[in-house]
Image: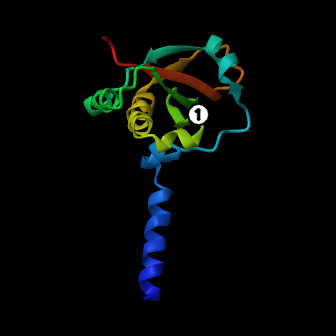
Amino acid sequence: MRLVGVVVVGLCASACASQDLVHFGGILNPVVPPGATLRCSEAHEHMTIVDRPTPDFPEELAYFMYINQSSGPREIHMLFDIGPDGTTSNIRYGADIEDLDHGATRDAVQPAARAIETWRYAWNDTAPARYATGCETRFDFAMRG
């Protein structure tokens, strides 16, 4: 019995550490920032957006909002960093983790994180550092009509 308990704890520990669990408060593409960084608000004048595809939210999300008569908009607040090669890292949910207890919010975080994962930026020659921290974005969605 003791061995089974160790195996279950070991499996949970490895699953909880998985970066695929961004919708449960984890981090997608985790990296340790270098010593020299810029706040994202300062970095925008030193970069251009190359590609920013939108998330592909699941159709079930609209159904869930409909059956719960949710007329108010939902926000998915996300945080991320931009690395020296223009790719995104440290992608995570940026609002209260308790909000992820709500299924519609949780189901929207994974597609939002996967979209941010594909975003690309290009640094220009004036950048004093080529790593931006604390970048934020928000995806809003609501039922219409």
Q: Secondary structure at mark 1?
A: loop
* Residue marked by disc 1: 95
Which residue is at the far bottom?
Answer: 1
Q: Quadrant of the C terminus?
A: top left
x and y, in percent, of residue 91 in the image: 52, 36
In the picture provided, is 144 more to the left or to the right than 38?
Answer: left
Reply above or below: 9 against 73.
below
Q: Position of residue 58 (x, y in %)?
A: 29, 31
Q: Relative to 43, does residue 114 appear above or below in the rendering?
A: below
Coloring basis for residues: rainbow
The amino acid type of the residue labelled 1 equals Ala
Q: Is residue 7 visible?
A: yes
In depth, the one of 134 and 57 nearer the eye is 57
Name the residue rendered at 50%, 20% in the picture: 121
Q: Quadrant of residue 144?
A: top left
Identified at 45% across, 20% down, the residue is: 72
51 relative position to 136: left or right = left
Q: Residues within 10 Å of mark 1 (few under 14, many from 20)?
A: some
Residue 74 percent across, percent down from the top left: 46, 24
Identify which residue, 101 or 122, lies in the foreground. 101
- Asked whether residue 82 appears in the rendered view, the answer is no
Residue shown at 73%/32% (left/top)? 36
Residue at the image position 39 percent from the left and 25 percent from the top: 70
Total marks drawn? Answer: 1
Answer left or right for 134 relative to 78.
right
Please determine whether, in this image, residue 5 is positioned above or below residue 38: below
Q: Image quadrant for the N terminus?
A: bottom left
Q: Nearer the viewer, residue 31 or 23?
A: 23
